[in-house]
Image (spheres, helix red, strand yellow):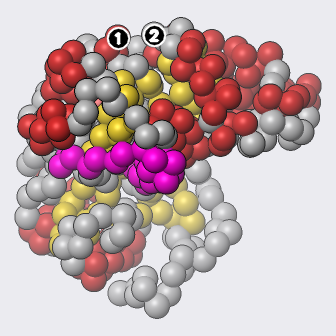
């Protein structure tokens, strides 16, 4: 068996099919990839390729400067307009990455002696870093237990009433595949009057009848103040965005340092993202197929899989690495996720589904998991999934 600790993956291995296939890192065999966040399989869609190529011929490659200085084009404006429409907000602002978007909004809203941030303990590292930056600027940081609305309310109730309160959470948690408690969050928002920001990185174009995200799927999009997202996952391009009210966009334009001091997104990338949003409208069957695969995998594993992210909890780091290596030898790449990404003792395989996968791909993966003895070793694959795993995936997708 390949020792992935002493023999790491090499850089620069050529991809045969960037969606679901790659060259084996240690032989000439092909791999089936269950490791990417290309949820709709759009990264290699011909419409995105053509849009990027046309924009490169028209605009060139580099944007040459920050958006505030001279890197903002009509394409950037159109993409912001389309994203605002998708999220149902007044405005939208593009960022070089989703990480930068979270860093900007959390640090801008959470800084100052009268500011308080309330963050889910399993939030993405970019939210964590934004909150840390805000706390260095005299903002008060409170961490609530994952999806524990009772704990969150205790923290909110103990916070002075004159403080500006920001509650921030991932909408779809990237390592457990579970969703934020939207009903609980919005109920507390109505009671305590805080700003609610959700990071829809893994849910945009994946959840909701239009692909508007998990907030849309749960019917509470209008009660979310700030919708954060990325263009590098289901959109299949690159970059990040914040969709919000006009006054919050103005705040980011003036106080969002990751925006002010970063070069704008390249025009070909922006054009590809616009094309992705158009494909999302024209080909809803991609999202429907993805959710069928979620149900298929869940049934094969004997669990209620609730998103395209399905973790198999195996416990130790060594066990996770060994399980990933065993699948690798059978032609499947399912990454081992270890600390510090997840807590000690919860190392796991992270299966990530894409609309580019076929039902045959999922069946073959299930066979490989059984042949490797991984299912019996993992016990309950979704042991670490969150409090709303019982939600019907049909409801989440609104098929």
Quadrant of the rendering where the C terminus is positioned? top left
Judging depth in this view, the residue of 113 and 195 nearest the camera is 113
Q: Position of residue 296 (x, y in %)?
A: 21, 39
Total labels drawn? 2
Could you tell me if the residues under marks 2 and 1 are in contact, i.e. CB atoms within 8 Å? yes
Q: CA distance from mark 2 to mark 1?
A: 7 Å
Q: Is residue 264 above or below residue 368?
A: above
Q: Secondary structure at mark 1?
A: helix
Vertical side of 338 occupied by 131: above or below:
above
Whether 143 is among the magenta residues is yes
Q: What number is the disc on residue 222? A: 1
Query: Circle 2 — which element?
Result: loop
Residue at mark 2: 88
In the picture, measured across the screen, residue 14 lies left or right of residue 68, that is left
Image coordinates of residue 7 in percent, x first then y, are 50, 87
Which residue is most to the bottom? 6
User: Residue, x 61% and y 28% (percent of image)?
Assistant: 252
Instruction: Looking at the picture, tell me which residue is in the foreground, 52 or 13.
Output: 52
């Amino acid at each position: 068996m390949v020792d992935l600790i002493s023999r790491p993956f090499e850089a620069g291995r050529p991809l045969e099919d960037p969606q679901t296939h790659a060259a084996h890192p240690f032989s000439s065999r092909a791999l089936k990839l269950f490791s990417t966040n290309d949820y709709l399989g759009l990264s290699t869609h011909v419409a995105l390729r053509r849009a990027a190529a046309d924009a490169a011929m028209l605009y060139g490659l580099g944007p040459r400067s920050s958006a505030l200085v001279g890197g903002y084009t009509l394409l950037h404006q159109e993409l912001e307009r389309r994203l605002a429409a998708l999220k149902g907000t007044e405005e939208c602002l593009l960022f070089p990455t989703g990480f930068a978007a979270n860093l900007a909004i959390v640090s801008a809203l959470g800084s100052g002696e009268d500011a308080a941030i309330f963050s889910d303990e399993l939030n993405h590292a970019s939210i964590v870093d934004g909150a840390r930056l805000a706390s260095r600027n005299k903002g008060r940081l409170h961490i609530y237990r994952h999806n524990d609305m009772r704990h969150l309310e205790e923290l909110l109730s103990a916070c002075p009433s004159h403080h500006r309160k920001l509650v921030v959470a991932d909408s779809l948690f990237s390592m457990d595949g579970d969703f934020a408690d939207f009903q609980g969050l919005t109920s507390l928002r109505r009671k305590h009057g805080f700003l609610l920001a959700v990071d829809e990185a893994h849910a945009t174009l994946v959840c909701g009848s239009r692909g508007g995200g998990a907030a849309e799927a749960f019917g509470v999009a209008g009660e979310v103040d700030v919708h954060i997202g990325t263009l590098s996952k289901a959109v299949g391009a690159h970059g990040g965005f914040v969709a919000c009210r006009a006054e919050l966009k103005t705040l980011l334009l003036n106080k969002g340092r990751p925006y002010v001091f970063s070069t704008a997104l390249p025009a070909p990338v922006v054009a590809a993202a616009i094309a992705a949003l158009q494909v999302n409208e024209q080909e809803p069957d991609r999202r429907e197929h993805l959710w069928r695969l979620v149900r298929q995998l869940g049934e094969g594993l004997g669990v209620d899989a609730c998103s395209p992210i399905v973790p198999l909890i195996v416990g130790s780091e060594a066990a996770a690495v060994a399980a990933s290596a065993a699948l690798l030898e059978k032609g499947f790449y399912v990454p081992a996720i270890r600390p510090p990404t997840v807590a000690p003792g919860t190392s796991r395989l992270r299966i990530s589904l894409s609309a580019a996968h076929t039902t045959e791909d999922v069946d073959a993966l299930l066979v490989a998991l059984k042949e490797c003895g991984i299912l019996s070793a993992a016990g309950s694959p979704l042991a670490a999934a969150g409090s709303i795993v019982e939600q019907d995936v049909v409801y989440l997708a609104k098929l």
